[in-house]
Image (cartoon, grey):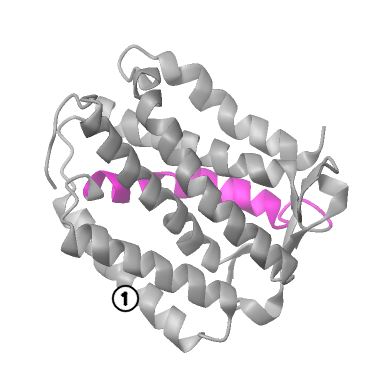
Amino acid sequence: MSLYLWIIVGSIAGPLALSFDQKVRFFQYWKALFPAIILVAIGFLCWDEYFARLEIWGFTSDYVTGIYFGKLPLEECLFFLVVPYACVFVYEVIKAYFPKRKTAVLARLFAFLMVFSGMYLGIVYLDNWYTASACILSSMMILGLYFVGKAPWFGDFALTFLVVLIPFLIVNGILTGMVTENPVVWYNSEHIIGFRIITIPLEDIYYNLCMLLPIIAIYEWLKTKFKLHKKVRSV
C-alpha cells in the first residue's frame, strides 16, 4: 500500500470507528453529510485537476498506487472524501462534549483575521495562482457566510478549524516532505509565496478553509432540511 494511501486510511480510521459513539451519534447525520461532501468534492477535484495539468502542483509517483483519474492519483481523490468526514466528525464531537462553549468572540476574531490576511495575500501575490485563488476565495466565503449571512454555526466552525490544525499539520507535513526524501505532493514555487510551516505552504491553510467551510454550510442546511438538529444555538 502506498504512503499516501496509508495516510488516508489513518485519517479515516478513528473518526469512522467512533462515529457510533452514543454521545455524538455521528452516523445519524450521514444523510446530510455525504451530499455536502460530494458536492464540494466535485468542485475541488476540478480545481485540483486543472492546477495539476498546469503543473502548479503534482504528485511523486513513488508514494502513490499508480491508479490515476486524469492527473490525480486515487489517493488524492479519496482525500476530498476522507478529510472532510474527519473534520465534520470533530465539529460534532466538540458540540456534543462541550455544550456550554462560547464562540462569539472567537468567531469575530477568526473571521476578521482570515478575511484581512486572505485578501491581503491574495491581492499582493495576485500573480501566484495558488496564493490568489485560495486566499481570495476563502475570504469571500467568510464575508458571505459570516458577515452577510450571519451563519449561527460559524463560531463552532472556527473552533473546529483551529482544533483540526493539529492533525492538519501532521498529515500535510507528511504529504509535503516532512518525513520523506521527496514530497508526496509538490508545489510549483512560482505559484506560492514560499513561506512554509515546517514543509507546508501557507496557502494550504486557506485551501483547507475553502474546502471545509462550504461543506459545513451545506451540511448545516441539510440538517435543518432533514430536521436533524438537536439544538440550534447562536454565536
Q: Amino acid at mark 1?
A: Phe
Verify whether residue 169 appears in magenta.
Answer: yes
User: Which residue appears at 25% of the width and 69% of the height?
Assistant: 112
Q: Is residue 45 left or right of residue 155?
A: right
Is residue 139 or residue 222 the one in the foreground?
Answer: 222
Residue 102 picture location, percent across and down: 15, 43
User: Which residue appears at 71% of the width and 63% of the height?
Assistant: 52
Q: Quadrant of residue 28?
A: top left
Residue 217 picture location, percent across and down: 31, 46
> The N terminus is located in which quarter?
top right
Residue 164 picture location, percent across and down: 44, 44
Q: Is residue 222 left or right of residue 151?
A: right
Give neighbour class at mark 1: few <14, some 14-19, many 20+ (Cα, 10 Å). some
Q: Label 1: which residue?
A: 116
Q: Is residue 224 left or right of residue 51?
A: left
Residue 116 picture location, percent across and down: 31, 76
Provide the residue span drawn in magenta.
Answer: 155-181
Is residue 162 visible in the rendered structure shown here?
no
